[in-house]
Image (tube, rainbow, N blue to C red):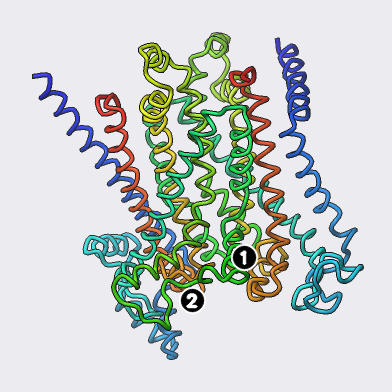
Amino acid sequence: MFDQSSRRRKSLKAVNSLSRSAVTILCVVVVNFVLMQMLPGDAAEVLAAESGSGSASTVIQLRQHFGLDRSVLEQFFAYLSNLAQLSLGVSPRFNLPVTELILSRLGNTLLLLLSAMGIALSSGVIAGVVMAANVGRWPDRLLSLLALLLYSVPAFWLGLMAIVFFAVKLEWLPTGGIVTVSQNNQGWDAALDICWHLVLPCLTLASFYVAIFARLTRSAMLEISQQDFVRTARAKGAGPLRVLLVHMLRNALVPVSTVAGMHFGALMGGALVIEVVFSWPGMGQLAMDSVMARDYSVVLGILLLASVLVIIANGLVDALHAWLDPRIAQD
Amino acid sequence: MQTTRSISSESSTWQTGRLILTNPTGLLGSTLLLLMAGAALLASYLYPGDPQSMVAGPLEWPGNDPAEWLGTDVLGRSLGAGLCHGARISLAVGIAAALLSVGIGTLVGALGGFYGGRLDTALGRVTEVFQTMPTFLFVIVMVAIGKPSISTIVISIGLASWPVIARLVRAEFRRLKEADFVASARLQGYSDLRIIAQEILPNALAPVIVTASVLVASAILTESALAFLGMGDPNQVSWGSMIGEGREFLASEWYLCALPGGAIVLTVLGLNLLGDALNDALNPRLRDRP
């Protein structure tokens, strides 16, 4: 009986949060459409200019063809129905469907993002635990200083300096790109080659977030260390390491994962610059190429997809919270 | 009652200032920021004329030429002049964008937190939408749509980064509107506007000030990344644009990127140190901790 009602409450909560996400996505779509309407010149003018036959009558014909002469509301519903079919239009510059263009770069960006997030979370949490366990002593002071420094360095500049040091002077790592073009590797060699190219961009992108997660884990651990259940765990004879890792860290991971979800969008913005610095062929580089070519449909498509990714990341964080702290799922 | 409050708030400002300057973190942060502000203010005195004009031979390493001791770039432009004039752009963009964010965020957060109900739900939705769109991508789209100028950049960064403040102010207002002093202000028949602006807001300001210093830092980082990508104001020298132009000669003339990057690091570090010190000084719960 109790179990059934709690299950119903859970599924109601899931439906609630799904509908919230749907509304948020719809709002992002509206913002996207408004931004598109604010663009200087419409697609007809761009296309006419590209084809070189920019007479007034061709522009009018093109407008009719693309439905740009219809009312804003009609255009909005046309945009929505296109979106429902996962179509974001055609890029005049590449002459390819925008969705296809973006999806072809998505894998590379996700590889960079997820590996950077993984490194930032793991090393940040470890550093934070070490700092909290040694609070006020030299490991805490040293790591705090390091975190503050990493927190203040622009990632793209750190990337450039890493290229100078590790790629140019020491020649340990490649300066950029995702594969060694001259080698034409297959199978494991190709995978290893990609990993080799991933090292510098991934560490550079992670640097800022290592600092964030380290500072946050430290303060969360310190706050938790004063709570009753920690004293209880010590009193019943749990060893210091067990109290630190099992009792305290599990609870500290709730705020840490919340912040990780909140920063996922910022991480994507950071990836854009890092992709340009390291010539990493991902969505960020595509976005910058499109901005420079004034090919806005691609940029807006990337903004939309990135927002969807942020919502997915936050959904995953919610699921993680329910697992870390079952009380959260009950609320 | 009015006078006692203004006196006590003045003395607490002094106390906060003293707490910051006696704290090594706050002292170092303030020193770094004063240095940068000095460079920005003295830019036209130290390096009169256009920082984009040629003053010496190209690609002089720092220390080679005593007149241009910070070196020159590929067009013979002075790096020292670029750094000083760039300090103006970075600080101006950082402060203006942060002020805009604080303004929008305070308005949205105060209204939502004070009135609650449907208005709060609606404003919360808007906040969530702006938080969902990746800030930097949103800024890039807005700068690409407008023309790349300092004012477009300030407005774009300000419009993209207010949700942090809105959430903070909303939480403070929800907490404080139940407080006794607000109830007594209501009994005295004060208007909503007066309660919001004169009673609750001054008490909600401490965390906003701390976050604002972090917002200035992140606006400076955003502006430098934009300029690095070639989307800055083409008529102004900025630290980011200097790094972007120096990137072509990265392998041999790396000082072209290293120096402006170092200036960004020192400025942002100064702001973050100051933010930490402000947090210690304004957050009484943590003040007495070892």
Residue A243 is left or right of residue A138, and the answer is: left
Residue type highlighted by circle 2: Ala
Residue A96: x and y in percent read: 32, 78
The location of residue A242, given as percent across then percent down, is 38, 25
Chain ID, mark 2: A
Q: CA distance from mark 1 to mark 2?
A: 33 Å
> Which chain letter goes with mark 1?
A
x, y percent for residue A196: 44, 66
Of mark 1 and mark 2, the one earlier in the sequence is 1
Q: Quadrant of the N terminus of chain A?
A: top left
Q: Relative to residue A113, is residue B23 drawn left or right?
A: right
Residue A197's image quarter? bottom left
A77 vs B279, left or right, is left
Same-chain check, marks 1 and 2 = yes
Image quarter of residue A10: top left
* Quarter of the rendering containing residue B82: bottom right
Circle number at residue A165: 1
Using the image as rendered, state which of residue A244 and residue B155 is in the foreground.
A244
Residue carrying label 2: A293
Residue A322: image location, x then y, percent: 28, 32
Q: Looking at the image, which residue is at 37% across and 60% down?
A: A111
Camera-side residue: B135 or A281?
A281
Camera-nearest label, 1 or 2:
1
Badge 1, how many Cα within 10 Å: few under 14, some, many 20+? Answer: some
Nearer-the-camera pick, A188 or B266: A188
